[in-house]
Image (cartoon, coloured by chain):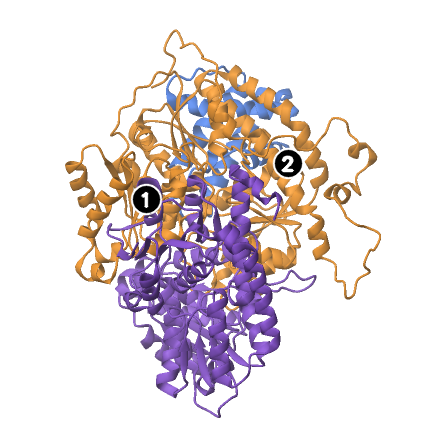
Chain colours: A purple, B blue, C orange
Amino acid sequence: MTCEILERKRAGIINPIFTCQPCGAQYASIGIRNCIGIVHGGQGCVMFVRLLFSQHFKESFELASTSLHEDGAVFGALNRVEEAVDVLLMRYPDVKVVPIISTCATEVIGDDIDGVVRKLNEGLLQEKFAGREVHLIPIHTPSFVGSMISGYDIAVRDFVSFFAKKDKPVNKINLITGWVNPGDVSALKHLLQVMDIEANLLFEIENFDAPLMPHGNTVAHGDTTIDDLRNTANAVGTIALNRYEGGKAAEYLQKEFGVPAVIGPTPIGIRNTDTLLKHLSDMTGKPIPESLVHERGIALDALTDIVHMFLADKRVAIYANPDLAIGLAEFCMDLEMLPVLILLGDDNVNYASDKRISALKEQAFFDMEIVTNADLWELEDRIKNKGLKLDLILGHSKGRFVSIDYGIPMVRVGFPVYDRAGIYRNPVLGYQGATYLAETMANTIFTDMEYKKNKEWILNVW
Amino acid sequence: MNDEIKSNAEELVNYIMKKCLWQFHSRTWDRKRQNEHILDMTARMIYGEEIKPTTPEEKCYWADAMCLMEAFNNHFGWLQKMDRAKKEAVMTALKDRIDFLTVTGSLNLELTDTHY
Amino acid sequence: MPYHLFKCSECIPEREKHAVIKGKGEDISMALPLGYLNTIPGTISERGCAYCGAKHVIGTPMKDVIHLSHGPVGCTYDTWQTKRYISDNDNFQLKYTFASDMKEKHIVFGAEQLLKKNILDAFAAFPNIKRMTIYQTCASALIGDDINALADEIMEENPDVDIFVCNSPGFGGPSQSGGHHKINIAWINQKVGTVDPKIDADYVINYVGEYNIQGDQEVMMDYFKRMGIYVLSTFTGNGSYDDLRAMHKAHLNVLECARSAEYICNELRVRYGIPRMDIDGFGFEPLSASLRKISLFFGIEERALAIIDTETARWKPELDWYKARLMHKKVCLWPGGSKLWHWANAIHEEMGVDVVSVYTKFGHQGDMEKGISRCEEGALAIDDPNELEGLEAMETLQPDIIFTGKRPGEVAKKIRVPYLNAHAYHNGPWKGFEGWVRFARDIYNGIYSPIHQLSLLDISKDEIPTDQGFVTNRMLSDANLSEEVRNDPNLHPYTGNYDNVSHLRNKKYPEFPRAEKDTSVA
C-alpha cells in the first residue's frame, strides 16, 4: 500500500494531456476586457487554439496572428508584429490591451518582441495612435518549455506586473482564479458576495457563457479591466486559488508591493472550500456568515446521501490541470473514493515539493500512482496492458476514447470539454461545486450500472 | 461571328462553367490540353462522328466529352436542329470562349507556375 | 473589375482585391479576387498553417499509421480530435496522436536522438501498427533535424516498418494549402511505386482527395463496388498506407477535392500516365454525371446507370420535399476550399437555395474561378476573409443560413444566423444520393429551427405570442406553401437511419465475371 511518484519514461507523447504554452497565454488574455492578443508565430498556433476555446465554450474568441510565413522564418518577422499591431488597432478601435505572445518558431529565430514593443511605443503609438490608450505587453511563451499551464501562469504574472501600480490602498482583495470555467467564477462571486468582500477578479470570465440576444452582437469576452489589474498592487491581499495557474502573479505582488499572498489550496470539495473561507475571513476580517453554514449544510446533506452507499471504495483515475487534478484527488479521499492514478501532464519540477502531493503520498492506504510529465497513454497502457481496474475516470474530453473503449464511466472536468453540453456552466469550486461533482460522479456511475446491468436493481430503493 | 452564334455558344459556355470541372486544371498547359481534346471530341460527336478512344488518356477525355455531348443534346434542343456549318460555328465559338475564360483571359496568376 | 472593399477594411486597402461581387453579365475574366497570398498580419484571418494542412487535413485520415509530429506537444494536441474523418479500423487515426515532445534542451542540442527513441517507443506501444508518418513542425524545421536520414536508418534496422516523412513546417506558405501541396509531392516522391500490388480486377482506380468525413468515402466505395470497380487506394480518407504506395498501378485517378490533392494526380499523370478525372460526389446530377464518366472510361456504363436509377428513385422524392421548402433561402457558402465549388451550383439547382456569398479560407484563385463560375450573379466572393469582414458581409447579406467552420459558426450564431458545419458536417455523410438528402435535411432543420425563431423575439419590446405552447419546424416551413406542394403525395422528408454508413462495412457485393478479353487499359 504505497503511493509512488513516477515520471513518464517513454520518449515522446502518445495522446497529450496539455497543449503548449501559447495556448495558456491566449486563455489568460481573453479574460481581459478590450484585449486582443497577437500571437507571434505560425497561423495554426492561433487558429487551433481559437478552435479549442470554441469547442469548449461553444463561443468564438478574438485572437490575432502575425501569420509567420517562410520569409519571416528566414529573415526574422518583427516587421509582421509591427504590421499586426497597426492593423489590429486600426480595425478594433476599442482594443486597449495587446499582449504579444511568442511561440516556439519566433523564439527559435530569436525575434526580439520586447525590442519591437519599445519601438512601437516610441514610434507607431506616438505617431499614429496618439491619445489612444494602448498597452503592448510582450509575453514569452516558447512552446518547448512547460505547457499551457505554465503559459497561463506566466501570462497572468506578466499582465499583473505590467499594470500593477502602487496607489492608495483599496479595500479589496485580489482573487486569482486559475484556469476555470464561467460556472466557477459565478460560484466564487457568490461566496465573495455573501462574505461582503470586494475583489479584483483575475479573471472575470462569466461572460464566456455569452447570451444569444435578439439584437446586436454579444461576443463572448472577459471583463477584467485595466483598473482591476492596476489595483492589484493596492489590495489588502491576494488569494491565488491555484498554485500553478496564477501563483507567480501572487508571488510577484507580494514581493514587489508587499501584498500578502495566500496560494491555494484549490477550493475543490468541502474541506478546501472551508479553508478558502478561512483565508478570506482572515484577510478581510469579515466573518463567515450563517448563510454559508447553511449552504455548506446543503452540500454535506447531499454528499452524505451518496458517499458510503455508492462512492466508497470506487477506484478513480484523474487527469487534468495540476491544481484541479490534485484538488479532485483530495476531494475523492474525503468522499471515501480511491484515486489510484493521478496524471500530471507536464514536467513542472515543483510538483515534487507540492505539500498536497506529499500528503497524498503519506496518507494513501491503497496503491496510488502519481505520474508527472504524463500523457494519456500512461492511463490507457495501465488499463490495457497492466491490469489497472477503474470504476471512474475524471478528466477532459481528449481522453474520451479511453472511457469509451474500455467501458469505464467518465465524468468530464477541466479543459477542454467538448463532448458534453454546457459543462463550463457548472462549478467545481466551492460548496456548489462539491455538490455538483459528487452528484455527477454518482449519477455517472448509476448510468453505467444500468447500462452494464451491474446491480442496477440496487437503485430500486434509495 | 453573328450574335446568334455568339449567344448560342454562350449558353453552352454557361453550362460548362456551371457543371464541369475538366476545364479548371491548375496550369495553363493542362487547361489548353483539356480544352483542346475534350471540346474537339465533343464537337466531333455533335457532328455525328463516332469516336473510338484507345489509350487511357483518350478514354478520359472521351468520357467527359460524351457526358458533355449528351448534356448539350438534352438541354439545348436547338443544337441538334442546326446544320453542320452552324454547329461548327457554335462549337468553334465555344472553344474560343472557353480558352479565353480559362486560359488567355484568365486572371488566375498561378496558371504559369512551373511546379505542380 | 467589380472589387468590393469592406468598410471594416478601408484602412487596409490591399484587401480590396480579395473580394469581388459577380455583377450582371460578368464572368471570371472580369471578376476574380486575388488568392493564396501571404496573410495580412493582425487581420484575424481564419487561416491555419502548412503543418496542419499536411498533418491534420491530408495525412491523418490514413488509418493504419502512427502519426508522429516532431516538435513541441502543442501542434499535435491542437490538431487532434477536431475532425470527423472516420475509418473502418475502429478509428485508430482519430484516437491516437504522437508527439516527440521537443523541449528546450533539444532546441539547443538537437532532437534527432529524441526522435529516434520516440519512433521506437511508439512502435513498441502499438505492435500491430508497422507504418508511421513523421511530420516536421516549425521548431524541428528551424533547428534543422534531418528526419529523412533518421527514418532511413530506422527502416534499415527494422525492415518490417515503413516510415514516411513530411517536411511541412507551419510557416511554409500562406495557409494550410502549402501543406496539402508538400504532402502530396512528398508522398509521390517517397512512397508511390514502393509496393507492387496483386490486382485481380479489370477496373482499377485511385480515389483521390477524399477524406471520409462522417463516412463520405465509404458511401462512394459502395457505388464503386456495386459497379465492380476496384479502388486500389483512397488518398487519404479511410486509406491504407500500403495501398497508397501502390497508386502507380491504377488505371484512373478519380479526383474529388482538387484543392488538396490535384498535385499528386498531376504527377501520377506525368510520371505514370494515369489520367486524372475530376468528379463531384455532391448533388444528384453532378454525382450521376461523375459515376457515368467513370463507367464510360471503363466501358461499363450500364452498371452506373443502374445505380443512378435506383438511387435517384429512392431518394429524389425526399430531396424534392426539402427543395420545395428551401426555395430562395439565402446561403453564405463559406467553407475552406473545395466545397465552395462542389456545392455552389448543386445546392442552388437541387435544393433551390440562393448562394449569396462564397468564401475560401485557404483556396487558390483556381478555386475561386470554379466557385464564381458556379455562382449566380450578385454573389459576393471573398478570399481569406477575416472576422470583421465576415460579420459585415452577414449583416449586409442577411443570409438565412451559413455553411462554415465550427468557430466562425459561433460568430454567426451570435448575430442570429444559423450555421452548418461545412468541414465536419452536422449529420453527414453528405456525399452520395442519400447523403445529399441528409444535407438538405440539415439545412432545413437549421433554417426552420423553432429555437432559432425564438432567438429573434425581444420579449421586452415585441408582442409575445401567448397562444402557442410549441412550434414545429414543419409549422414554420409549410406556412407559406401552397396546398398542392404541402400535400404532394410524391414527396416526403428523409427516411434514412441516423447511421447510414456502418452497415456498408458488412455488405455483400455481386461478383462481376472478369472481362473475357482484358479491356483494362493498364
Q: Position of residue C268 (x, y in %)?
A: 33, 31
Asked whether, in this view, residue C12 is left or right of residue C152, the answer is right
- Which of A163/C261 is in front? A163
Residue at 69%, 63% in the rendered image: A215
Q: Work out whether residue C508 can be spotted.
A: yes
Nearest the eye: A170 or C297: A170
Looking at this view, name the residue that lies furthest to the top: C516
Where disc 1 sits, the SS reads helix
Residue C349's disc is: 2
Residues indicated by labels 1 and 2 sit on the same polypeptide chain = no
Between marks 1 and 2 in the image, the one whose residue lies nearer the viewer: 1
User: Up-down: is C491 above or below A156?
Assistant: above
Q: Is residue A410 left or right of residue C522?
A: right
Answer whether residue C31 is visible to the viewer in this image: no
Q: Mark 2 packing: few (<14 Cα in 10 Å), some, or many (20+)?
A: some
Q: Write down the residue under mark 1.
A: A381
Tell me which chain the residue with mark 2 is part of: C
* Mark sitting on residue C422: none
Q: Chain of mark 1?
A: A
Name the image quarter holding residue C91: top left
Residue at the far right in the pictured view: C467
- Pick the residue in front: A54 or C177: A54
Q: Is residue C183 above or below residue C229?
A: below
**In this rendering, is residue C56 above or below A269?**
above
Q: Is residue C45 left or right of residue C464?
A: left
Point 70% across, 33% down: residue: C321
Question: Which residue type carries mark 2?
Answer: Glu
Q: Position of residue C372 (x, y in %)?
A: 55, 45
The structure residue drawn at horizontal position 16% and vertical position 41%, both measured from the top left corner, is C153
The percent position of residue A83, horizontal first and vertical second, equals: 41, 69
What's under tag 1, amino acid-wise?
Asp
